[in-house]
Image (cartoon, grey):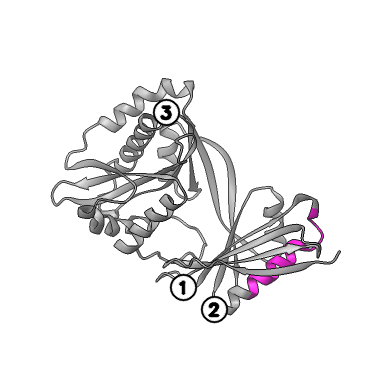
């Protein structure tokens, strides 16, 4: 089968990185597959690229994925990357493809879902009680979209809560956050037509944000909401703030978006603390995904 790989470049480069793309076709213009490479450029992650390869099921095992992979890996080397990461659901063709081509499994993620149907009604009072329980010395604040200006600096500082998140052997680096990056992340969500809600814990002694929980929902408020991250600064852990914020995030989503059918979260298997929080709030595991890494 004749195979043509066409390189494409995303003209919109963000401050956090840029994307390269390749389209595979059989010479007649009919697409067979694609590959996308996100090249990170932010401080702390200049060594990293993230890969996604897609091949039409009818065209698999014909070398399409391998050719796309070769093009993407060559580009990662040319860009001076040290590591390429890629994710696939466990037991899928993507899982087997990456394992067979030199990628090593470095992280296992468990996806879990909280149904917001009639079954939620039996848990609603319990989740409300968690959200309403006082935590002396702390209070909750929340906002939609971009963080309010007066909180932007302290919110950016609180992002280091994710620096020690269990990532097993993943060469992810340490993402450096500042106000510019916080604002850019919120804008990216809005530009996709989605809605971002953030719940944050504030230290009442100085007004600083010490933890946060982010949730993104479709623009029409229907379907599945996705938790983007929940973290607490190390010096404020042990007070139940993570569960408190996530419970309030659930309650807010249920109130503001009654058309949602569920909330989805993913957690590294090594992050036992967050997995316990998810279990306590009623999230039910749905499947596992594997993070693979190729060292260049």
Which residue position is annotated with label 2?
80
Rendered location of residue 75, percent (x, y): 61, 74
Q: Residue at x 46, y 29 (%)?
A: 259
How many angstroms separate mark 1 from mark 3 (CA)? Answer: 41 Å
Rendered location of residue 282, percent (x, y): 45, 31
**Foreground of the two, 3 or 28:** 28
The answer to which of marks 1 and 3 sits earlier in the sequence is 1
Rendered location of residue 44, percent (x, y): 41, 70
The answer to which of marks 2 and 1 sits earlier in the sequence is 1
The answer to whether any part of residue 164 appears in the image is no
Label annotation for residue 46: 1
The correct choice, above or below, for 67 with respect to 78 in the image is above
Q: What element carries label 1?
A: loop
The correct choice, above or below, for 120 with respect to 144 in the image is above
Contact between labelled residues 1 and 2, with CB atoms less than 8 Å apart? yes
Q: Residues within 10 Å of mark 3 (few under 14, many from 20)?
A: few
Q: Residues within 10 Å of mark 2 (few under 14, many from 20)?
A: some
């Amino acid at each position: 089968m004749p195979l043509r790989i066409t390189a494409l470049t995303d003209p919109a480069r963000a401050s956090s990185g840029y994307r390269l793309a390749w389209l595979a076709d059989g010479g007649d213009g009919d697409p067979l597959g694609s590959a996308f490479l996100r090249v990170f450029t932010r401080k702390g992650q200049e060594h990293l690229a993230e890969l996604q390869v897609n091949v039409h099921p009818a065209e698999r095992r014909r070398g399409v994925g391998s050719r796309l992979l070769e093009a993407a890996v060559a580009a990662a080397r040319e860009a001076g990357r040290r590591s390429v990461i890629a994710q696939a659901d466990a037991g899928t063709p993507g899982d087997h493809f990456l394992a067979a081509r030199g990628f090593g499994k470095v992280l296992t993620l468990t996806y879990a879902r909280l149904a917001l149907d009639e079954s939620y009604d039996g848990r609603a009072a319990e989740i409300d009680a968690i959200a309403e329980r006082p935590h002396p010395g702390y209070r909750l604040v929340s906002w939609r979209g971009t963080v309010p200006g007066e909180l932007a600096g302290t919110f950016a500082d609180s992002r280091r809560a994710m620096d020690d998140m269990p990532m097993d052997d993943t060469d992810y680096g340490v993402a450096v956050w500042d106000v510019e990056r916080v604002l850019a992340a919120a804008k990216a969500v809005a530009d996709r037509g989605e809605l971002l809600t953030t719940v944050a814990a504030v230290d009442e002694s100085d007004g600083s944000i010490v933890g946060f929980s982010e949730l993104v929902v479709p623009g029409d408020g229907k379907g599945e909401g996705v938790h983007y991250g929940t973290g607490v600064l190390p010096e404020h852990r042990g007070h139940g703030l993570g569960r408190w914020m996530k419970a309030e995030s659930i309650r807010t989503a249920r109130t503001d978006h009654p058309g949602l059918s569920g909330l989805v979260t993913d957690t590294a298997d090594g992050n036992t603390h967050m997995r316990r929080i998810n279990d306590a709030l009623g999230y039910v595991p749905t499947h596992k995904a594997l993070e693979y890494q190729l060292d260049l």
